[in-house]
Each structure stands twice: as C-alpha cells, then as structure tokens.
Amino acid sequence: MKLAILFWCYKNADLCEDRVKNLRKLNPETSIYVLFGGEPSNSKKFELTLKPYIDDFFTFDETPPPSADDVQFREGAYWKYYFGDLLISSWYRNCGARLGWDTIIIVQWDMLILGSISEIFSTLQEDQILLSGLRPVGEVEDKWVWVAPSELQNRRIYLDFLAFVKDRYAYSQEPLGFVAIVMGLPRTFLEKFSHIQRPELGFMEYRVPIYAQIFGTPFCTDHRFTPWWGAVEPYKKNSTLRARPWPISKLTILRNLFNPKGSRVFHPYFGPTPSGLLGWGRAVLASFLRWREKKHPADMES
C-alpha cells in the first residue's frame, strides 16, 4: 500500500512551510500533495513557498454548496470547514485521481507530525478508512452539537441527511460520527464518495463514516488516535488531539516524545517545529522562563 500526505491549508504561509519542511524531512520518500483552501488570490504565494518540499499543489476555488447559507454560525469561509470533506472530494476529482497513491493521510496546517507516516500508520491496511474518535452517534447524541435535539437547525440537517441516505441507499445501520482531526482515506472510498448525490446534505463528521458504511469500506480501529470530544466529555489537559483551538503544550509534546509508545501526532499546535528532543527541551524551558517572568518579574530581575 502506497501512503501519501494531503496537506490541507488555507492561511499562515510561514507556518505551513515549517510544517511541510518537517514532513519532507521525516518522510523523504512519501508524496506530499497540497490542498489549498484559502483565498484563490493567495494561492500563488503558497505554491511558491511550499514548492521545494511538495509533489503537487491544488487550489480549491469552487463556490459554496447550495445549502451553505443554512449552516449555523456561517461566517466568511466557515463553510469550507463545514464542508471540508467536499474540498477533499473536489481535490480527488480534479487532481488526486491521476496521482499515484493508495491511501492519503490528511495533515492539517495546524497539525504537528513528528515521525514517518509509514510507522505512525503502520496498522492501517489497504482499503481501510481511519477516522479519529469514531463512535456511534447514539453515545453522544444528547450533547454533540451537530446532532443534539437542543440544536434545532443542526438537528434538522442531521435528520434530513439520514432520511436521504435511508431512501437513496436503504441505509439501516447505526449512525457513526468522528472528530475530524486524523484521517486516512483510501482511493477506493474517495472514488465513490466523489460522486455522491446531494453532497451538501449533512455535516462531514457523520457524513464521511456513514458513507463509508454505505460503501462497505472497512474501518481501521487498531490505532491510538483518541481525540478529546469537547463538550461531550470532561476536558483532558494532557490530550494530544483536540478539535478546539486550544494548543497542545510543548511539555505534553516532549513527554510523548520521551515515551517510545507516546503520540507522534499533535493537534492543534501553532508554533514552529523544534529539532529533536534537545530542541523541544529548550522550547519547554524557554516557555517556562517566559511564564515565570510574566508571573514573577521581580524574581527574574534579582
């Protein structure tokens, strides 16, 4: 099975360069493709910045799906997050289908990967789909914002989606959801997913796994990508995967790097990438000194 990386970005060219440069260093033989979802006018800048490290660059420049105006809290390009899987689907139809890979690992611009893709995803088998935090919707239905009865608009969108797949595909399985952080998508899934009818129906974090069920795509469950589910469960201070913009601390990253069985995937992280354990140790110390100076400025002056 040939793994490839799909680096999904839309802002902060300098940080994206840091991430892609690090990915290339750790994965010298792995193809790295870029899906740029930012303003098309910024596309050329990003392409020139990332070009030394990548194998292909694609700009998504389509308009919102017809139902995008119905998305709750829609603001600016928010719909590109809400329909993120459809951006990936567009990449496949217009670009990815002609490239040489079997499964793509989605790497978001604010995700930090500190290891080789082949090792980190060694348990992922051919044609399997990997979705972090995969679980039955019924386990979180009362609290998950995208389906909860208290969220009237989101609930309507969810029920309309279920009604459609039940009618169109005779779907009768237990609905699944996931936290869209770590994703491994096989070509066999994307080939079918890129041609679905009414793609604007539903939300990506249940749309993708439900279509995987419909297509008979096997799920990879032999992995350790366990994200914090937000309001669904108590806050996990030492989590390494969070969908909310609360960055993973450098100390948490360093602790995992010292542990041979620790995580090598962190999200979100917005800082530059130090080099090796020593670099991360220095970064932790620098963060501590800045905190101490802010907390106790007099002590630092003495």
Image: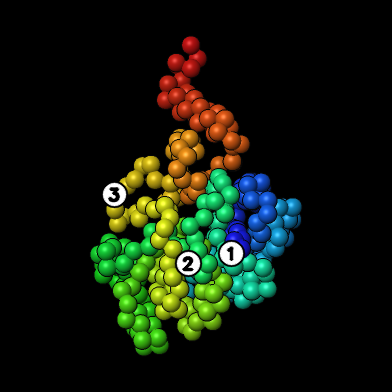
Q: Identify the amino acid type marked 1.
A: Met
Work out which residue is located at the far bottom of the displayed protein and give it.
167
> Could you tell me the amino acid type at mark 3?
Pro
Depth check, front residue: 90 or 291: 90
Q: Secondary structure at mark 2?
A: loop
From the image, state whether disc 2 or disc 1 is nearer to you: 1
Which secondary structure lies at badge 3? loop
Front residue of this view, candidates 72 and 143: 143
Judging by the rendered image, the residue that carries numbered circle 2 is 129
Given the image, on which type of amino acid does mark 2 rest? Ile
- C-alpha separation, residue under disc 3 versus residue under disc 2: 27 Å
- Number of numbered tags placed on the structure image: 3
Disc 2 packing (10 Å; few <14; some 14–19; many ≥20):
many
Cβ–Cβ below 8 Å for labels 3 and 2?
no
Q: Earlier in the sequence, mark 2 or mark 1?
A: 1
Q: Position of residue 126 (x, y in %)?
A: 53, 67
Precedes in sequence: disc 1 or disc 3: 1
